[in-house]
Image (tube, rainbow, N blue to C red):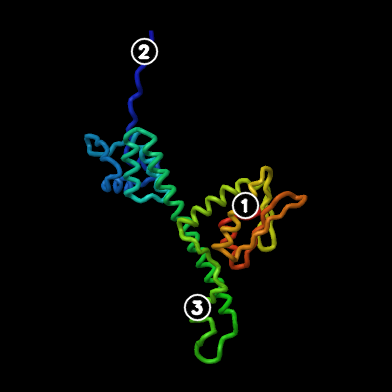
Amino acid sequence: MSTTTDAAPRRYRIAEVARLTGFSPTTLRFYEQAGVLSPPGRTPAGYRVYGDRDVERLGLIARAKDLGCTLDEIAGLVAAWDADECAPVKHQLRSLVNAKVADVQRHIEDQVALAAQLRATAASLATRPVDGPCAAGCGCTSPVPEALTIACSLGGGDTATRAREWRTLLDAATERHRLPHGLRLVFGAPTPLAEITRLAAAEHDCCPFFAFAITVDGRGIALEVTAPADGQVLLESLFGTAP
């Protein structure tokens, strides 16, 4: 007759945990002091000892850290995780990630607008210098002419919504082809023609530098999007690139 016994729980010293998780001992102590990690057990000699549960918890912390979560956000996730229910953790992490997606999208839009301003300024600075000190029209101190500014007039939240709508539509594209100043997107059947028309018209209202053309020929139904040189960064950000 044979008997089985449960394996004894693993115990790790701080150096072992550092090796397993990628967190340095200094970082582990910092998380403990910040209240993100509960104080670990101690050996009779006073050394910290961690269990498998601690290592798993640090896996969640590493994931949240990679996603750009703050210390307070990580602490909230750990508190939810310690309840041993996936649903609250997933809900909380999803909310954090969605908020960060919106923040990143706003940052991209700001950078695209800045890139357009820089390119327009570079173009104005390429003109011949005036004689004597800087003056109106030399490009050094005068603002960028409005006609040269390439930017979207939508606010951050509206832009994120519009970007999601485009991503949903672009997922239906079966082919992508480069154009001299843009992109040709071919759609298969059933073609979401009404949605293509709606989004193209709405996008042109906020970004009039985009030009849209819907073509129907032997190659199929396609949407062609083009933009001037200063709008290429925004075009690629919104519509991607062709292979």
Mark toward the start of the polypeptide (1 vs 3):
3
Residue 121, position as x, y percentages in the image: 54, 75
Left or right: residue 176 compared with residue 217: left
Q: Position of residue 154 (x, y in %)?
A: 49, 61
Sequence order check: which comes first, mark 2 or mark 1? 2
Q: Gap in Å between the C-alphas at discs 2 and 3?
A: 84 Å
Instruction: Classify mark 3: helix, strand or loop.
Output: loop
Q: For numbered disc 1, what is the local secondary structure?
A: helix
Taking 209 as reference, is 73 left or right? left
Q: Classify residue 38 as left or right of residue 199.
A: left
Q: x, y (%) of residue 191?
A: 66, 46
Measured in 3D between alpha carbons, the distance from the residue under mark 2 to the one under mark 1, in whole angstroms, is 68 Å
Residue identifier under label 1: 196
Q: Residue furthest bottom?
A: 132
Q: Nearer the viewer, residue 9 or 217?
A: 217
Q: Amino acid at mark 3?
A: Pro
Farthest-out residue, top:
1
The residue beneath circle 3 is: 143
| Camera-nearest label, 2 or 3 | 3
Number of other residues with Cα within 10 Å of mark 2, as a class: few under 14, some 14 to 19, many 20 or more: few
Q: Earlier in the sequence, mark 2 or mark 3?
A: 2
Instruction: Identify the residue at horizontal 53%, vertical 67% (top origin).
Output: 115
**Looking at the picture, does residue 132 appear above or below residue 96?**
below
The residue sitting at 35% across, 37% down in the picture is 81
> Image quadrant for the N terminus?
top left
> Mark number for residue 3?
2
